[in-house]
């Protein structure tokens, strides 16, 4: 079993600082915490009235924590893990409550669904979330099928953007300068075209040097960032009850490959490299281009019924390459252990219709929806290793249909404190794929259909006006697919079937001390069956098989606490516990239960974060705010079948000092000094089998300054 959390001097120091600040401000005025409004259930409501375990980040939260896109959510939400994929550091592998994909293939779906303004993003490469003016990010833990068009067994991450504002000209420039030649600039303008039409334009550019120098030929460094994106959004309100929003985004990512280092097995910790190998030849930058369209039409039919249409189209061209462990085979005259290059393209179309309403004097609230999704793509990948050159060409076509709904009823008993919510989703998925593999001189073909019914039940009770509890049971489903890394064409053709997860959850949402303290917690158990387990069964790390191997159970606990201790002082603590284990895995060859040989990946037993923010009294030059946060996670397995692949525990300390409300006459200016990983901890952002135990290291200490001007 992995280790339990150990006392941490950094965390002790953080809370000591909090205690001093409380003592110094004991006579300050009291203030309630700001209300957090979310749309996790397709209607605006307080997070305290939402019987779901979720975390939400406002615009201010995103700026203060340096969250600019999906990958920056890493370490900010306990029980959420995001790690870079070995073949592409721009591709995030997402795990929620121990459920996720340890591989990224065009022939399989993710376990955690990502949405941008209601549009499901099947392949998350690109900068659509980074360039947009994000109003809020919501992270929903556990299956969410009864309210979302695409189902997923792990959870959902929703990015909600701000609509262009009618009747007001606005401008914002956010400029960040930092070490390693960091330059990040996001320029946004809000243009009122008519009384009923507004346009928002955004442009983003990011440049940053990687921390590993390339001693071979090609690009100068591993891990450089070179990114650009732009976005245009329109908001048209032809009448008081109709709202039409359209947006287009384009992004270009020309990052250089991440450095993959050979590291020792656990419990030894590798040292973060600063130089690569002289044996690297012609290292090329990646070339990732993504486009997206979103058309959302909202119509308030009457005071109790609204209709919404969400139409989405996204396109991705992905040319990436990687060099694994260059130099470790130098004795035999070979530069890297192996290299990979993948050129893929994908496009998707989705259409969703929603009806959101209430009846029976608002005792009944309901959501009903229809969903269609179509995806096509192809990829060509090349792997070169000693004695072997492998080429694979893959084509896919996927279709999904769903009908879903949820109804919440408050009976006229118990002083309207009881709330009963039922939901369901019927899914139909069609998947088709072909593969031509040069090493086998054969072509594979797979064609599979899947259907599923996923119900949910929530019983909530308002113990007081500030405390409510809920019990939830929900089934989740993830469609099957095909595995391009299969050890035989026959196994590719057979594919793998869907997996199912049944989750039981007890939770409490509470506010105390005149709403100055907010405490939300949930305990859950997830029973997992027909799990899609990725196992390395061949001689090469590029060969794995996916089996619907058996059963597992995941037990866990999550707690989010925030408190405004004085007028200027706010603190927060979040904690998560996971106990995930396989109960049955049938060996596909012998039929024996070999569950004791397998481990849940990206599922640390313990993780937590703590933050403190103090806003000093206003001065003639502005308002000073000091912020610090610390995140820690325990050891975790990085491979389902190799007990030597364990990522060590680590903690990261970040801080920010901001001066806002600077008197400049026109507009609003704020300046902030920030630092991340201030203790310069060496840790693995990702760990895997790259021919031998390998890792991508997390960034070293970084620091810089933000300038934000708004008008």
Image (spheres, helix red, strand yellow):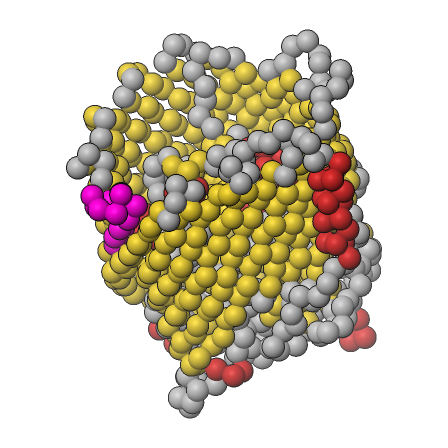
Q: Quadrant of residue 366?
A: top left
One can see residue 274 in this view:
yes
As for residue 414 lying within the magenta part, the answer is: yes
589 or 179: which is nearer to us? Answer: 179
Q: Quadrant of the C terminus?
A: top right
Q: Residue at x 51, y 38 (%)?
A: 515
Q: Quadrant of the N terminus?
A: bottom right
- Tell me residue 245's x, y (percent): 37, 26
Report the side of 188 relative to 42 (left or right).
Answer: right
Q: How many marks?
A: 0
Q: Is residue 568 above or below residue 211?
A: above
196 or 450: which is nearer to us? Answer: 196
Q: Which residues are magenta?
A: 408-425
- Tell me residue 390's x, y (percent): 56, 68
Q: Residue at x 51, y 43 (%)?
A: 512
- Tell me residue 316's x, y (percent): 48, 44
99 or 590: which is nearer to us? Answer: 99
Q: Residue furthest left?
A: 360
Report the side of 140 relative to 559 (left or right).
Answer: left
């Amino acid at each position: 079993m992995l280790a339990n959390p150990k006392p941490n001097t950094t965390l002790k120091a953080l809370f000591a600082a909090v205690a001093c600040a409380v003592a110094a401000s004991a006579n300050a005025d009291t203030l309630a915490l700001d209300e957090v409004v979310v749309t996790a259930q397709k209607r605006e409501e307080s997070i305290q009235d939402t019987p779901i375990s979720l975390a939400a980040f406002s615009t201010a939260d995103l700026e203060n924590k340096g969250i600019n896109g999906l990958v920056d959510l890493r370490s900010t939400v306990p029980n959420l893990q995001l790690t870079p994929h070995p073949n592409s550091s721009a591709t995030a592998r997402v795990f929620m409550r121990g459920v996720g994909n340890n591989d990224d293939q065009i022939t399989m779906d993710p376990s955690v669904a990502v949405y941008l303004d209601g549009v499901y993003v099947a392949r998350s490469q690109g900068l659509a979330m980074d360039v947009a003016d994000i109003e809020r990010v919501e992270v929903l833990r556990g299956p969410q099928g009864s309210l979302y068009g695409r189902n997923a067994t792990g959870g959902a991450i929703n990015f909600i953007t701000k609509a262009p504002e009618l009747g007001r000209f606005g401008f914002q420039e956010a400029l960040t300068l930092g070490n390693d030649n960091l330059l990040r600039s996001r320029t946004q303008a809000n243009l009122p075209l008519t009384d009923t039409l507004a346009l928002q334009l955004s442009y983003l550019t990011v440049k940053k040097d990687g921390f590993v120098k390339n001693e071979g030929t090609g690009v100068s460094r591993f891990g450089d960032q070179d990114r650009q994106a732009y976005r245009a959004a329109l908001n048209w309100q032809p009448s008081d009850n109709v709202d039409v929003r359209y947006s287009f985004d384009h992004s270009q990512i020309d990052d250089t490959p991440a450095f993959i280092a050979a590291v020792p097995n656990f419990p030894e910790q590798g040292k973060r490299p600063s130089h690569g190998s002289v044996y690297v030849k012609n290292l090329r930058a990646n070339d990732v281009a993504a486009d997206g369209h979103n058309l959302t039409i909202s119509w308030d039919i009457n005071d109790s019924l609204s209709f919404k249409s969400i139409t989405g189209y996204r396109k991705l061209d992905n040319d990436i390459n990687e060099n694994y462990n260059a130099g470790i085979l130098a004795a035999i005259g070979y530069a890297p252990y192996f290299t990979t290059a993948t050129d893929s393209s994908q496009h998707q179309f989705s259409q969703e219709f929603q009806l959101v309403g209430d009846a029976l004097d608002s005792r009944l609230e309901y959501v009903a929806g229809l969903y269609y999704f179509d995806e096509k793509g192809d990829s060509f990948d090349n792997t070169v290793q000693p004695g072997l050159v492998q080429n694979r060409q893959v084509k896919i076509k996927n279709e999904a249909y769903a009908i879903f709904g949820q109804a919440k009823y408050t009976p006229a008993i118990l002083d309207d404190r009881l709330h009963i919510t039922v939901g369901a989703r019927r899914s139909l998925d069609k998947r088709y794929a072909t593969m031509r593999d040069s090493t086998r001189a054969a072509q594979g073909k797979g064609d599979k259909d899947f259907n599923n019914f996923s119900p949910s039940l929530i019983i909530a009770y308002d113990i007081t006006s500030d405390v409510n509890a809920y019990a939830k049971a929900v089934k989740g489903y993830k469609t099957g697919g095909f595995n391009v890394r299969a050890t035989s064409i026959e196994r590719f053709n057979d594919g793998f079937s869907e997996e199912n997860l049944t989750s039981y959850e007890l939770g409490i949402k509470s506010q105390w001390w005149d709403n100055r303290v907010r405490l939300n917690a949930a305990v859950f158990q997830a029973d997992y069956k027909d799990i899609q387990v990725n196992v390395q069964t061949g001689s090469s790390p590029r060969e794995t098989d996916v089996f619907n191997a058996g059963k597992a159970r995941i037990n866990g606990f999550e707690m989010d606490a925030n408190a405004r201790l004085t007028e200027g002082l706010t603190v927060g603590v979040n904690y998560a516990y996971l106990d995930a284990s396989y109960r049955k895995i049938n060996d596909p060859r012998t039929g024996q239960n070999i569950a004791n040989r397998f481990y849940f990946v990206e599922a640390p037993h313990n993780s937590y974060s703590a933050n403190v923010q103090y806003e000093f009294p206003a001065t003639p030059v502005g308002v000073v705010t000091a912020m610090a946060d610390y995140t820690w996670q325990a050891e975790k397995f990085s491979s389902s079948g190799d007990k030597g692949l364990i990522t060590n525990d680590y903690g990261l300390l970040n801080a920010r000092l901001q001066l806002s409300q600077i008197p400049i006459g026109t507009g609003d200016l704020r300046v902030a000094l920030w630092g991340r990983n201030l203790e310069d901890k060496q840790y693995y952002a990702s760990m895997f089998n790259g021919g031998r135990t390998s890792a991508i290291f997390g960034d070293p200490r970084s620091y810089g300054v933000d300038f934000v001007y708004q008008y």
